[in-house]
Image: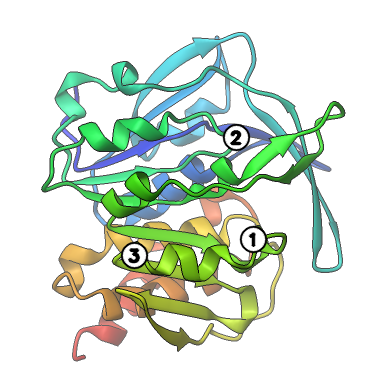
Amino acid sequence: MTAIDYLLLGHMTADLTPHGRTPGGTVSYAAQVAHTLGRRVGIVTSTAAGETLLATLAQYAALSVRVADHTTTFENIYRGTERIQYCHSTATYLTWDDIPAGWLNAPFVHLGPIAAEVDPRLIHRLPPETLVLLTPQGWMRHMDADGRVHFKRFYDEDVLRRADVVVFSRQDIVAAPELEPEFAALVKHLFVTDGASGGTYYHQGVPQPYAAYPVTEVEPTGAGDVFATTLLACLPQVGHDMGRASRVAARLAAACVTRAGIENSVTPAEVQSALDMVKDG
C-alpha cells in the first residue's frame, strides 16, 4: 500500500452538468489541491464497479474503493446565488474497517462527507496526534423522496471537540444560524465561509473576520473544499501557523472559482505565489 500523509474519506461523486458527468465531491477537489501542495494523498471512497471518473482522482491520489451498486450522483442547479441540489443515487457507507491499515497513521486526516456516508464515530479511533479536518456539509443534509437535498441539523459535541479544524459555509446553516456560535464554543479552529464576502475565523471561540480576494467568478462549486483543504495541507509550509494558512487558503479558493473542473482547480504556480505571499509574515 502506497505511503500517504493526507488521508481523505468521503464519496467521489458523479456531478451531472450540461457537459456530461464530471467528478465532484469534497474528496475530488481536495485531492487535487493537497497533491499540488505536496501532500501524498490517499482516498477512501465508494463508487460503482468500473467507475471511469476515478481515473481523474488517480492522477492525484492512491485510491481505496469500496464497490457499490451506484456512484453517488448529484445535480446542482444555480439560480443567481441560490443552489438547488438533487442527489440521484448514493454509494456505500464508509466505516473504520474501510481504511487500509497502512494509512491509519497519516498525520493529516480530512473527513469530507458529501451525503452522510462517513461514520462520525471513526474520528475517535484516530491517533491523538493526528490533525483532523472536518468539512461536515454532508452530515448537514437529507434527501426527500425526489432526491432534493435539504438541511439537516448536525451537532455532535464529542466529534466536534476531537476535530482540530472545522470548515463550513454560512449558506449551509441558513436554517439554523445558532450552529455558528455553538460550533465556535467547541472547535479550536472554526472557519465559517461566506463566498465573496470572506468569512469568520474563530480561534478557540474568538471571532476574527477575513476577506476574500476579488475575482471574476466562473464556477463556485468546490471553492469551500479548496479553502478547507488548503488550511490543513499547507500547514508544513507555513510553520503550522493557522493565520498564514488561512491567507493561502483564501487566495487559492479565489483562484479556483475563475474556472470550472477539479483538474483546473489550482495550479502549481498559484500555490507557489500564495505561499510566497505569506512567507514573511
Q: Badge 3: few (under 14), some or many (20 or more) residues near its Cα, within 10 Å?
A: many
Q: Specify which label sits upstream in the sequence, 1 or 2.
A: 2
Tell me which residue sits at (31%, 86%) in the image: 277
Going by the numbered disc 2, the residue's amino acid type is Ala
Q: Is residue 104 above or below residue 213?
A: above
Would residue 57 be found to the left or right of residue 218 on screen?
left
Query: Quick check: can you spot residue 21?
Result: no
Q: Is residue 2 above or below residue 158?
A: above
Q: Specify which label sits upstream in the sequence, 1 or 3.
A: 1
The secondary structure type at the circle numbered 2 is loop
Residue 74 position within the rendered picture, expressed as x and y whole percent measured from the top left: 72, 36
Residue 155 position within the rendered picture, expressed as x and y whole percent measured from the top left: 49, 49
Instruction: Please give the label number shown on residue 173.
Output: 1
Q: Nearer the viewer, mark 3 or mark 2?
A: 2
Instruction: Kindly report the distance in space between the C-alpha atoms of the residues bearing marks 1 and 3.
Output: 21 Å
Tell me which residue sits at (20%, 75%) in the image: 241
Going by the numbered disc 1, the residue's amino acid type is Ile
Residue found farthest to the bottom: 280
Read off the residue under disc 3.
231
Q: Nearer the viewer, mark 1 or mark 3?
A: 1
Q: Quadrant of residue 165?
A: bottom left
Instruction: Kindly report the distance in space between the C-alpha atoms of the residues bearing marks 1 and 2.
Output: 16 Å
Q: Nearer the viewer, residue 76 or 256?
A: 76
Q: Is residue 11 above or below residue 80?
A: above
Q: Specify which label sits upstream in the sequence, 3 or 2.
A: 2
Instruction: Kindly report the distance in space between the C-alpha atoms of the residues bearing marks 3 and 2.
Output: 23 Å
Read off the residue under disc 2.
115
